[in-house]
Amino acid sequence: MISTFCEKFEDAFKVRPGRAAKLADRDPRDTLGLHDEGAADARQAHNVRRLSDLQKVLYAEGSRAVLIVLQGMDTSGKDGTTRHLLTGVNPQGVRVVGFKKPSELELSHDYLWRVHMACPRRGEIGVFNRSHYEDVGIVRVHGLVPRSVWTRRYQQINDFERLLSENGTVVLKFFLHISKKEQRERLQERLEDPEKHWKMNPRDLDERALWNKYMAAYEDAIARCASADAPWYVIPSDRKWFRNLAISEIVVDRMERMRLRYPRPAFDPRSIKVK
């Protein structure tokens, strides 16, 4: 029965090019009718094993790459998604990058310079924990650059992602959609659990106060940068188990459609004997 739901993931969560994201109309607690968390966990474990196998072939093939972009509000689960998705993958073939406040060196270049430098090499799976979308998100919300600057970036980002795609990088972008209520509960949990105090920053509450501005910024970014080259998926993320399942299904399905193959050796293995 779970396979019936899995077939709907792409249609349910993919934002079609030219369409509005309509975040307010999307339920962060949606599970497509799936309520058996145990079955979902079993399927997630299967996907983790399958992803591990696919990554081995991707690394051996060495001609293409996969870039997974994770965006969302604080506590939406970017770290958790990365951990659950890549738990069985060989670290040698994975590159995870978290984008924080730009350094002095990064600010001396164009805003996409540090992003391009962090893209996965051929043969790798790359994960961006936040990304170039901060440059049309937090930059917009806090007025760090003029409107005339950040509005031009949508087309620049589309061109950049098309460049990656045309040169062998599969780009998959996920917006981890949580409710404001769920964020409050997760922030409170960080305050109450001593082992999670390190995750808490009082400034997170300042960002929370700008929730509506962030939603408007994300809606525009998703709608204006959803393309066939680099699709956007809005993933309901109030339920962590469903978030993990949905993303793993989409990533595994897309990698299977790459038709990865181990390269043929430049010699005849049958002609060689190890003595």
Image: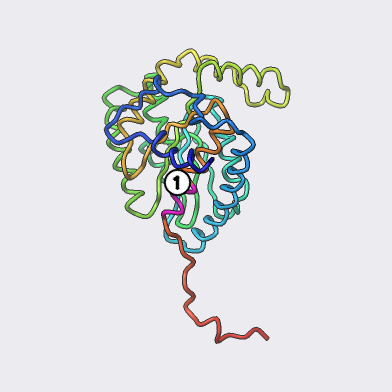
Residue furthest front as drawn: 1
Vertically, is 233 above or below 118?
Answer: above
Vertically, is 140 above or below 266?
Answer: above
User: Splitting the image into 4 quarters, where does residue 152 fall?
Assistant: top left
Vertically, is 191 above or below 40?
Answer: above
Q: Position of residue 121 (x, y in %)?
A: 46, 54
Pick the front one: 235 or 207: 235
| Amino acid type, label 1 | Leu
Q: Which residue is drawn at 48% across and 12% down?
A: 209
Pick the front one: 176 or 199: 176
User: Splitting the image into 4 quarters, where does residue 167 fall?
Assistant: bottom left
Q: Where is residue 12 in the image (x, y as percent from the top left)?
A: 41, 34
191 left or right, relative to 244: right
**Can you say which quadrant of the picture contains the C terminus?**
bottom right
Q: What stretch is highlighted in magenta?
A: 252-257
- At mark 1, the secondary structure is strand
Q: Which residue is drawn at 38% across and 36% down?
A: 14
Q: Residue at x 57, y 30 (%)?
A: 35
Looking at the image, how many numbered discs can be counted on the residues? 1
Q: Which residue is drawn at 36% across and 49% down?
A: 164
32 left or right, relative to 229: right
Residue furthest top as drawn: 209
- Does the magenta run of residues contain 262? no
Q: Where is residue 118 in the image (x, y as percent from the top left)?
A: 46, 45
